[in-house]
Amino acid sequence: MSVRTLAVLGATGSVGEAALAVARRHPDRLAVSLLAAGGTRPVRLLELAREFRPRRIVVATAAAAEAIRAELPAGAELRWGEPALVDAVGAGGIDLVLTAIVGAAGLRPAAAALAAGADLALANKEAMVAAGPLLRRLAADSEAKILPVDSEHAAIHQALRAGRRREVRRLVLTASGGPFLDRDPATLDTVTPAEATAHPTWNMGAKISVDSATLMNKGLELIEASYLFDVPGSRIDILIHPQSLVHSIVEFRDGNSIAQISANDMEYPIRYALSHPERWPRPDDGAASGLSGLLEATSELQFRKVAPEAFPAPSLAREALVRGNGAPAALNAANETAVAAFLDGAASFTAIVPAVAEVLDRHDREAGGTEPATVDEALEWDSWGRRQAREVLAQLRG
């Protein structure tokens, strides 16, 4: 049994911690060679460095590096900044890179990993949204695999193993509906960041929790699914499923559908990505965490269609996917900017989606050319989307 070298980008976040929990349980299969984190949790990063003894540690800033330098285990190389991270994952010698960096900031490291031939366990949907065709081309050129870590895309990846791509009729992503599924829309203008980040079924970071509340996360996942699985957006649907147990469905041409079911615990899709093409056992294998336990714990599984008037964000994402030419990157950038403004108290919750819609309209009027062919071109659209979003938000405040 060979041991694969693993890099974890975003090591102190919830996804990174879950990935390291898998590595902790399978030291005969995974050896952590690189830990990367922003550096905002230095005590935790030092604990992980002492436990896993990686060869390299990368943090975001020089200040973050100085905060931990004196207490690092002997032999660990410490660097800081995006160029250092890109160099570290692109230098070779790493078999598998799990990236859980939030937002478009994860694009350069993801591209570097694939170009170096490392398999990419992708929890950073924004990177695929901003430059999906480019990442797929890099993977094909180096014969690396892109293994989705989002629960929905991991579910589709598993369900697709039941048939051939030409036999697929449609993909169905499921959504919890977030914390405001049944709330009176007239009251949403007063939503606070604390309310928007209180997800009913998942423990996630602030940004993705807000995306879940607006359902923009499903729009981004629709774009990601189209790029990952080479399926047009017209054949990808979304269903509200408040229990978050059925993570996605693949419907085949013969009328059969394959649904993937598991507890709403990110360790399941992470373990799937890190162990692929094998399936490693859980420590509690056979316990009530399996299908029988889930069905015993719930009396019903509910599904309903997305109401576009209540949740317009998925329709915006579908429109951006059809437009192409950098529209998905601009949409993602505008959303990141608007969500950050909301979390900082500079914009209302109800301003997020209208701001994104206005940026997409501006893209339609100004865009030209072709799909981004390089990381720099994708990030140019990202920068454009952020500038436009800041202008729109300022006008909404004025």
Image (cartoon, helix red, strand yellow):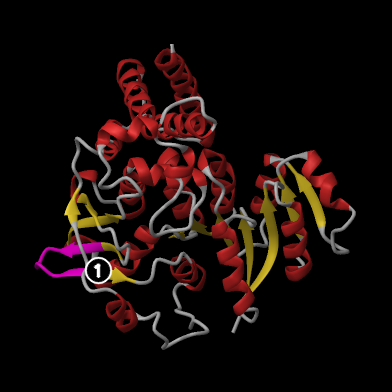
Q: Residue at x 27, y 78 (%)?
A: 295
Q: Estimate how packed mark 1 is, as few (under 14), some (14 to 19) or many (20 or more) residues with alpha carbons within 10 Å.
A: some
Residue drawn 36% across and 44% down?
213
Residue depicted at 42% across the width and 86% down the height: 287
350 left or right, relative to 142? left
Which residue is at the front of the view, 258 or 299?
A: 299
Residue situated furthest left in the rendering: 254
Left or right, residue 115 beside residue 366: right
Residue 129 is a magenta residue: no
Q: Can residue 118 be seen in this view?
A: no
* Residue 248 position by quadrant: bottom left
Residue 263 position by quadrant: bottom left
Whether residue 330 is situated above or below residue 165 in the rendered picture: above
Magenta segment boundaries in residue numbering: 249-258
* Residue 48 locus on image (x, y percent): 72, 64
Q: What residue type is labelled 1?
A: Ala
Left/right placement of residue 340 relative to residue 162 reads right
Give the dominant element type of the magenta stretch: helix, strand or loop. Answer: strand
Does residue 352 lie above or below 209 as drawn?
above
Which residue, as the protein is rendered here, is positioned at the far bottom? 286
- Residue 376's quadrant in the figure? top right
Q: Is residue 340 left or right of residue 316?
A: right
Query: Which residue is painted at 19% across and 44% down in the image?
Result: 234
State the quadrant of the C terminus.
top left
Q: Position of residue 249 (x, y in %)?
A: 24, 63
The residue that label 1 is drawn on is 259
Element carrying mark 1: strand
Q: Position of residue 368 (x, y in %)?
A: 35, 20
Above or below for 374 versus 65: above
